[in-house]
Image (cartoon, grey):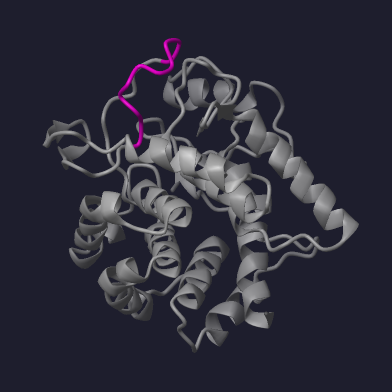
Amino acid sequence: MPSSLYSFNPAFAEITPPGAVRRLLRRRHGTDIGFDPADEAFSAMLALAVLPPAGTPAERQFVAAVVRQVESARRGSRFAFFPGVPAFPADTDCTAVAAGALFEHGLMPRSRLLTAAQELVRSAARTGGEMANGPLHEGVFLVYWDDGAEPRARPRGRKHDAVASANVIATVHLATGHTDASLATLAYLRRHLTSGDYLMGTRYYPSPAAFVHAAARVCLRCEHCAGQLAGPLTTALSRAEPKAALDLALLAIAANHLGLTGLAPWREQLAAQQRQDGSWPPSGYFRMGRVPLWFGSPHLTTVFAIRALYEEMS
């Protein structure tokens, strides 16, 4: 990804100078999005979702810092990517990841998780048709709500993303214990997987490993979903040849979710990429739709790497 830029999240103690990423976008691509994209909270949400239970005081302190950033993005029962940008609306991906992570760390009661899940279910497309990035599928969860709940937010358009959809199913099932409201989205995910479309990445996630990881999380939480996805995911994992540390970690975690064995080579490769300061190198994990900006950091990769290696020992 030669045009990629990396936004380093303040929650992980690597602070981008104010406005630096915005200036870089303007200089390299002639694009000014109107705010500093380094001020995002999604990295913290993703980290909280994969962090093992905190044990030591230092671990609890780190988790508390991550939680503060996650909570800064709360908008009622929803969560937003950019906490300080009212014009940028809350989305289902952030809401699903943040609510599920807070609940699993014991920081959100089930009643509030259920409310968030009900919000997520309301995002399902009411009709089919066409949208900016492909067909609109009736009943499949959208990335953005189309209900005018945030009057200051600019419309982002109706669109799907397979990774976001998987994250939504995982949280809806975590909250409700059933998948009735997710059946259309589950079928959408299976088509995305079995057709091979996942190999091209998605609008917001450039690596196929991101989808495999998200879909495996769905299987971990939903037995019925596993019946639809586990077989094709196992095939996808058997064909994968990850090189980057982030992809190695994502796929190792996915394989563990599916109960697969024989992961030693991937974990050995992952361990070999650890740097002298204890971190792992960054990769672009997610991106801003039409804007050529990828988000990632050594800290985010390291969280996934720790989780992958932690699960090997647990």
Q: Position of residue 127 (x, y in %)?
A: 13, 34
Q: Is residue 174 magenta?
A: no
Please provide percent x and percent y for residue 41. 60, 35
Which one is nearer the viewer's eye here, 195 or 149?
Answer: 149
Residue 191 visible, this orientation: yes
Q: Residue at x 60, y 71 (%)?
A: 308
Give the magenta-colored segment's residue range.
Answer: 143-153
Asked if 53 appears above or below 158 in the picture, the reply is below
Using the image as rendered, state which of residue 16 and residue 145 is in the foreground: 145
Residue 296 visible, this angle: no
Residue at figure coordinates x 52%, y 16% from the top left: 86
Which quadrant of the figure has residue 213? bottom left
Q: Who's the residue at 46% across and 28% down the image?
A: 90
Q: Is residue 254 above or below residue 100?
A: below
The chief SS type of the magenta part is loop
Which percent across, then down, holds residue 85? 55, 18
Picture quadrant where residue 20 is located: top right
Query: On the rendered structure, is 210 left or right of 302?
Result: left
